Structure formats: C-alpha cells, structure tokens
Image (cartoon, helix red, strand yellow):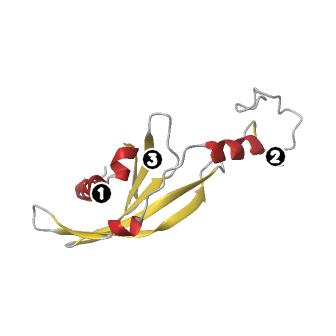
C-alpha cells in the first residue's frame, strides 16, 4: 500500500488512523472540500411549481432544503433537495443536487425513485436556469429507472 496523501504528497505511514481517510490526511481532505467551487441556487423555493404535462398529468415540484451528509469515504458534502410527485402516481421522486462543481463545470444529480437511484452529472448552467432545471426534473420524473 502506498502511504502517501494524494493532496500534499507527504508520507502518512506514521499518522494515527483517527487523522486519516484511507491514506489521506483528514485535514487535507477538509481543506480541499473548503476550496472547491460551490454551487449556490438563489431562491430555490421559487422552483416550487405545479406543471401540466403534454399527457395531461400534473407534476408538482417542492424544495425541501439545503442539507449536509457524508459519503462512503466519510467525506462531507452538501446538497439541495427537491421532491416531485406525479398526479396519478403516489411515488415520490427525490432529487439531490450536490453543491460541488467539478472541473468540467458539472454537478452531481442523484435521483431517487422508490428503492432505485440514478446518479448523473448535469451542467451548472441547467441548474442556474430555473426553467431548464424544472424541465430536467420533469423529464426524470417521467423516465423509468431500470
């Protein structure tokens, strides 16, 4: 195993496990998380909408809040959460838009339908354009996750 922190390239073989995430210094990871470009959705509650679709169904989208969590590697992240309901289907679709912007200008969009999850990358421009984001959510509500 290579005991080198990928952020500072220093040896971590003599560092206590409480201060490591894998072979990386916890402090380096936290500093890197702080320095990442973050997405900010202004007035996300304005995304609360009731949308009439071409098939005459109605999809309601509601902003649920700005939340925080940790991933499988115990690295903290934050996300905006939205819920969508289609009128004739009681199943809720939950969207979590992560705030970390990658080097390609994309953010991670996690879509939960029942016990199924779809993880995709979408351009920040879609998130910042309220109409484009609502249309993307409607598209994903109507899409079947396999």
Query: Residue 110 appears at what percent x and percent y?
Result: 42, 53
How far is mark 3 from mark 1, CA to CA? Answer: 14 Å
Label 2 near label 3: C-beta < 8 Å? Answer: no
Residue shown at 71% from the left, 33% from the top? 7
Other-residue count near label 3 (Cα within 10 Å), few / some / many at <14 / 14–19 / ≥20: some
Q: Residue 137 shows which numbered tag?
A: 1
Query: Residue 14 appears at what percent x and percent y?
Result: 89, 35
Query: Residue 36 appears at what percent x and percent y?
Result: 59, 43
Can you see residue 92?
no
How far is mark 3 from mark 2, CA to CA? Answer: 27 Å
Say which of 15 and 122 sits in front: 122
Q: Which residue is mark 2?
A: 19
Q: Is disc 2 placed on a helix, strand or loop?
A: helix
Other-residue count near label 1 (Cα within 10 Å), few / some / many at <14 / 14–19 / ≥20: many
In the depicted structure, whether residue 144 falls above or below residue 86: above
The answer to whether residue 113 is left or right of residue 55 is right
Can you see residue 4?
yes
The answer to whether residue 87 is left or right of residue 114 is left
Q: Residue 38 shows which numbered tag?
A: none
Other-residue count near label 2 (Cα within 10 Å), few / some / many at <14 / 14–19 / ≥20: some
In the depicted structure, whether residue 62 falls above or below residue 79: below
In the depicted structure, whether residue 34 falls above or below residue 83: above
Q: Which residue is mark 3?
A: 108
Q: Is disc 1 placed on a helix, strand or loop?
A: helix
Say which of 38 and 75 sits in front: 38
Q: Is disc 3 placed on a helix, strand or loop?
A: strand
Label 1 near label 3: C-beta < 8 Å? Answer: no
Residue shown at 54% from the left, 64% from the top? 67
């Amino acid at each position: 195993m290579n005991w080198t922190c990928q952020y500072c390239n220093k040896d971590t073989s003599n560092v206590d496990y409480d201060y490591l995430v894998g072979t990386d210094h916890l402090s380096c990871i936290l500093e890197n998380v702080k320095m990442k470009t973050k997405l900010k959705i202004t007035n996300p509650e304005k995304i609360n909408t009731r949308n009439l679709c071409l098939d005459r169904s109605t999809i309601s989208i509601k902003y649920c809040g700005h939340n925080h969590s940790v991933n499988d590697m115990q690295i903290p992240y934050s996300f905006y959460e939205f819920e969508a309901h289609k009128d004739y289907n009681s199943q809720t679709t939950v969207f979590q838009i992560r705030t970390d912007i990658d080097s390609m200008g994309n953010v991670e969009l996690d879509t939960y339908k029942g016990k199924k999850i779809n993880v995709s990358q979408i351009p920040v421009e879609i998130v910042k354009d309220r109409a484009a984001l609502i249309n993307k959510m409607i598209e994903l509500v109507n899409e079947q996750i396999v």
